[in-house]
Image (spheres, helix red, strand yellow):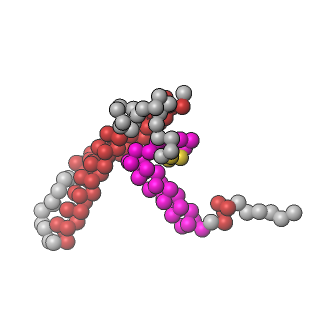
Amino acid sequence: MALSIPRVLEEKPLDKIARVGARCVRNVSAYIKGDTLQGGYMSSENSTQKDGGQKGGGRKAGRGFMLAALVFFLIFAGNIIIGKVSVVMGATNAVGFGDVAEFLILFAAVAMFIGACLARERAEKKTSA
């Protein structure tokens, strides 16, 4: 009787990280496009609710939160890039937001992302119930 090694243990750690990362990117891009969660996976075939319509007149649950998170994150990333460029160019004064403002912007992005996830889960529970 031969012992079989589970596939998870046979994979190299970097391969597993790359596979999980690719799945996350696919799920986030599908979420932003508006596909719905069905059985834990993104599926565009079953993108309508049980009543045949979309929540909010065609809008997906949590889309506003997701867009707000994207805006806050782009502001945060832009500030980081502006600060780095100013340091490389030799600026003596700090350009961009301060440390506390950076933290608050990133915190707002994370809070909006969590809000989008919770709204999506709540909508999924309503449609499955």
Q: Residue furthest bottom?
A: 89
Residue depicted at 42% across the width and 47% down the height: 31
Image-based side of 99 in relation to 38, left or right? left
Position above or below: 118 against 78: above
Position above or below: 40 against 99: above
Residues shaded magenta:
12-40
Q: Is residue 107 visible?
A: no
Q: Is residue 10 visible?
A: yes
Q: 80 or 40, which lies in front?
A: 40
- Residue 110 percent location from the top left of the image: 35, 45
Quadrant in the picture for the C terminus: top right
- Residue 59 percent location from the top left of the image: 35, 37
Q: 23 or 57, which lies in front?
A: 57
- Residue 40 percent location from the top left of the image: 54, 44
Residue depicted at 51% across the width and 41% down the height: 46
Q: Residue furthest front?
A: 52
Image-based side of 63 in relation to 80, left or right? right
- Residue 95 percent location from the top left of the image: 15, 59
Residue depicted at 47% across the width and 28% down the height: 51
Quadrant in the picture for the N terminus: bottom right
Q: Is residue 13 magenta?
A: yes
Magenta stretch: dominant secondary structure: helix
Position above or below: 102 against 125: below
Image-based side of 103 in relation to 86, left or right? right
Position above or below: 60 against 86: above
Q: 70 or 93, which lies in front?
A: 70
Q: Is residue 4 magenta?
A: no
Residue depicted at 38% across the width and 48% down the height: 32
